[in-house]
Image (cartoon, rainbow, N blue to C red):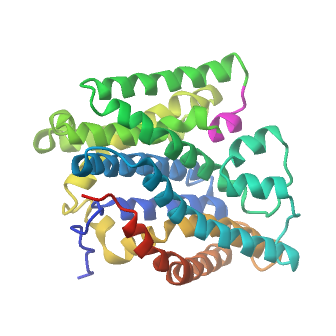
């Protein structure tokens, strides 16, 4: 029987690494050529939801331990976590372009926007050169970083209020309304709405809302695990399938994201609170969890590898050779990156962890 990764380690929540694996698998499969079967954008939404949930859970833990949130330490933890793999991967990509193994052209404006996490808006308004083919997906890093900059302070203001979850729900509704306004009044394209922080922030906030509802006990009351678990999960699956099936642009640019966020709430709740059930146990298998640990680096590098293999004529888009070759190279790169870049940073990350 496969080993199941223990879930009692500090700052480790059941099933989350498994969800990271699911998310990166969806994104990878889409970029490797099966986007007509697998909606890659949902993998990004899954990453967003997970980040909102995890960060809020950790912020709640820090407040319970110390009575407050150290914003400088929080931001330093994010820098130590995000920048080393990103900078190394950017250097690798630029090097591959320089020696002719990847497509692109050196553009400092684009590179700086990717390094400092404003690439999503820069790509919309500055019409940048694609400095490295395969790094266009870094728009999602910008959305997450904008969330990291804003949410800790907002959470500090909200956590003492009895109606915090209601206020957050109002923000979620307001984000949906703003998407409608952008689509109808400003005639923003589906792509512009897809990558903008102001229209996608709710994907993270749905995760935040679940974490808050779990902390105050409302999630247990809402989902009533013993009686309505399969009703909630069945409804979530049906709702997700509907969001994939409906192709109408107005729906895809507006209501789709809200419905996906709602559908993910019961799925995450049961996966985290009942990780040993047959349905969610695979998420906690050791090898599944390990891929989840590597998922950030896998996200950074996989599309670069896909594009490089295609550019050099080594595999065609959507072919088994491309899928298998890109997967193997991406996993090898992520494992090496973890060993020589990420793992050496763990002691510093532990030092920056909340005291208490």
Image spot of residue 52 (x, y percent): 42, 46
Residue 193 in the magenta stretch? The answer is yes
The structure residue drawn at horizontal position 65% and vertical position 51%, both measured from the top left corner, is 117
Residue 244 in the magenta stretch? The answer is no
How many marks overall?
A: 0
Image spot of residue 261 (x, y percent): 42, 38
Q: Nearer the viewer, residue 271 or 38?
A: 271
Q: Is residue 254 left or right of 228 when viewed as pictured?
A: right
Q: Is residue 69 visible?
A: yes
Quadrant, the C terminus: bottom left
Figure quadrant of residue 188: top right
Image spot of residue 236 (x, y percent): 34, 40
The structure residue drawn at horizontal position 77% and vertical position 80%, both measured from the top left corner, is 314
351 w.r.t. 344: above or below: above
Q: Nearer the viewer, residue 337 or 61?
A: 61
Q: Which residues are magenta?
A: 188-195
The structure residue drawn at horizontal position 73% and vertical position 72%, both measured from the top left corner, is 91
126 w.r.t. 309: above or below: above
Q: Is residue 260 left or right of 96 when viewed as pictured?
A: left
Q: Nearer the viewer, residue 260 or 76?
A: 76
Q: Main secondary structure of the magenta part?
A: helix
Q: Is residue 217 left or right of 290 when viewed as pictured?
A: left
Quadrant, the N terminus: bottom left
Q: Nearer the viewer, residue 312 or 143?
A: 143
Image spot of residue 14 (x, y percent): 27, 61
């Amino acid at each position: 029987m496969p080993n199941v990764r223990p879930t009692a380690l500090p700052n480790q929540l059941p099933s989350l690494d498994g969800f990271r694996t699911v998310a990166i698998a969806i994104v990878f499969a889409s970029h490797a050529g099966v986007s007509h079967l697998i909606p890659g954008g949902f993998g990004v939404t899954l990453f967003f939801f997970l980040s909102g949930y995890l960060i809020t859970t950790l912020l709640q833990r820090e407040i319970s331990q110390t009575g407050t949130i150290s914003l400088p330490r929080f931001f330093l933890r994010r820098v130590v976590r995000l920048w080393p793999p990103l900078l190394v991967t950017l250097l690798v990509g630029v090097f591959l372009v320089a020696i002719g193994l990847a497509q692109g052209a050196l553009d400092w404006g684009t590179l700086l926007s990717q390094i400092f996490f404003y690439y999503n808006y820069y790509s919309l308004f500055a019409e940048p050169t694609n400095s490295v083919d395969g790094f266009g997906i870094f728009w999602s890093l910008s959305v997450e970083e904008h969330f990291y900059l804003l949410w800790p302070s907002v959470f500090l203001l909200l956590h003492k209020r009895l109606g915090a979850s209601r206020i957050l729900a109002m923000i979620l509704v307001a984000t949906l309304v703003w998407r409608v306004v952008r689509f109808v009044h400003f005639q923003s394209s589906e792509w512009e709405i897809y990558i903008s922080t102001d229209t996608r922030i709710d994907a993270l906030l749905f995760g935040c809302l679940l974490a808050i509802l779990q902390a105050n006990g409302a999630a247990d009351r809402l989902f009533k695990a013993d009686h309505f678990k399969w009703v909630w999960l069945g409804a979530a699956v049906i709702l997700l399938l509907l969001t994939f099936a409906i192709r109408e642009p107005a729906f895809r640019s507006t209501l789709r994201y809200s419905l996906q966020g709602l559908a993910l709430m019961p799925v995450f709740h049961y996966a985290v609170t009942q990780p040993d059930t047959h349905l969610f146990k695979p998420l906690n298998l050791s090898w599944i969890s390990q891929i989840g640990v590597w998922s950030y680096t896998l996200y950074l590098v996989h599309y670069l590898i896909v594009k490089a293999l295609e550019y050099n004529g080594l595999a065609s888009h959507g072919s088994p050779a491309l899928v298998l070759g890109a997967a193997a190279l991406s996993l090898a790169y992520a494992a090496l990156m973890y060993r020589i870049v990420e793992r050496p940073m763990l002691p510093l990350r532990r030092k920056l962890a909340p005291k208490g």
